[in-house]
Image (cartoon, rainbow, N blue to C red):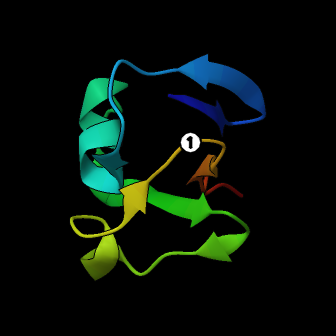
Amino acid sequence: MKIKLNGEETTLDKDSITISELLALKDVKMPDMVSVEHNGDILDRDKFDTTQVKEADQVEFLYFMGGG
């Protein structure tokens, strides 16, 4: 399956995958600190385990940085 992940075309060896599985597959450090946009919508964290990513979906991992 092909998706767009963080603006880049990405090929996955699965027909569907959950957001949580995608975070693990891409070895995202501290996934509890990442917000996810799926097809233009910011997902609630409690939907990561049930939201399926499918062919041609767009996913963005959003990292918020603190500073001063």
Which residue is more in the foreground, 35 or 25?
25
Splitting the image into 4 quarters, where does residue 48 fall?
A: bottom left
Residue 58 picture location, percent across and down: 67, 49
Which residue is more in the foreground, 45 or 21?
21
Which residue is more in the foreground, 67 or 55?
55
Name the residue: 24% across, 42% down.
21
Left or right: residue 5 versus residue 8 is left
Name the residue: 60% across, 21% down.
10
Splitting the image into 4 quarters, where does residue 24 fall?
A: top left
Measured along the vertical axis of the image, is residue 33 above or below residue 11?
Answer: below
Residue 65 picture location, percent across and down: 61, 52
Splitting the image into 4 quarters, where does residue 33 fall?
A: bottom left
| Disc 1 packing (10 Å; few <14; some 14–19; many ≥20) | some
Query: Of helix, strand and loop, which one carries label 1?
Result: loop
Quarter of the picture containing the C terminus is bottom right
Residue 43 picture location, percent across and down: 49, 75
Name the residue: 36% across, 32% down.
28
Name the residue: 68% across, 63% down.
39
Measured along the vertical axis of the image, is residue 8 above or below residue 15?
Answer: above
Q: What is the three-letter code of the residue carrying label 1? A: Glu
**What is the total number of numbered labels drawn onto the structure image?**
1
Residue on which disc 1 sits: 55
Outermost right residue: 7
